[in-house]
Amino acid sequence: MTRNGQSQAKPEQASLSPDLEAVLAENASKFDAKARPIFQKFAELLFARLGAARDNWLSAKSLAAIGVDTFHLLQNHLPGRPTVSVGRTALPVSQTGSAETLREVTVLVIINNDMPFLVSSVMGEVQARGLKTHLVLHHVQHVAMAIKLSNSSS
């Protein structure tokens, strides 16, 4: 319940494809034991609404790579400062037999403290430049940070 007595919305439940779950599990196994469950929950939340995306042509392997790269950026994110990453990469689109079809894309990742309308503003700028977006993954991560304060005596 919220302060005003209304019930809170339930967190989104992930409904990831079996292919994506398998590739994410494979990638999670590369993290140390402490980071592994954090990555798994992060990826679940990041891709929770993927099923609602229209025309998603990215393969599970590509989505997992985006998830891993974004998680690494989040691990190095400094509170109160934006983290922005823009890069071009060739991502697998589909797999036919033993050959993968690659497609070059630009991946934009923004990690920031709560800023209402940031996604709308960024999307407006992207569209104003005539660029096409293929997939927008936007999930608000609620992060609690532990800060260790030490008393230093002089």
Image (cartoon, grey):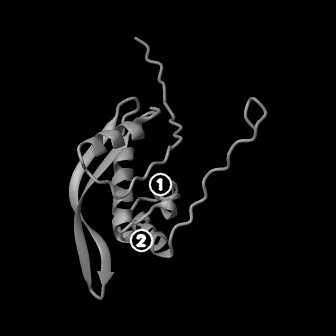
Q: Earlier in the sequence, mark 1 or mark 2?
A: 2
Q: Position of residue 142 (x, y in %)?
A: 53, 41
How busy is the neighbourhood of tag 1: few (under 14 within 10 Å), some, or many (20 plus)? some
Observer-nearest residue: 27 or 128?
A: 128
User: For the residue labelled by badge 1, is the local secondary structure a helix, a strand or a loop?
Assistant: helix
Tell me if residue 76 can be seen: no
Q: Position of residue 136 (x, y in %)?
A: 40, 53
**The disc labelled 2 sits on which kind of residue?**
Val
**The disc labelled 1 sits on which kind of residue?**
Leu
Disc 1: which residue: 46
Residue that protrudes farthest toward the right in the picture: 5
How busy is the neighbourhood of tag 2: few (under 14 within 10 Å), some, or many (20 plus)? some
Disc 2: which residue: 23
Relative vertical location of residue 70 with respect to residue 121 in this rendering, above or below: below
Q: Position of residue 63 (x, y in %)?
A: 38, 64
Quadrant in which the N terminus is drawn: top right
Q: Position of residue 149 (x, y in %)?
A: 48, 25
What is the spatial separation of the Cα atoms under label 1 and label 2, in whole angstroms?
Answer: 15 Å
Left or right of 138 on screen, residue 100: left
Relative vertical location of residue 77 with respect to residue 13 in this rendering, above or below: above
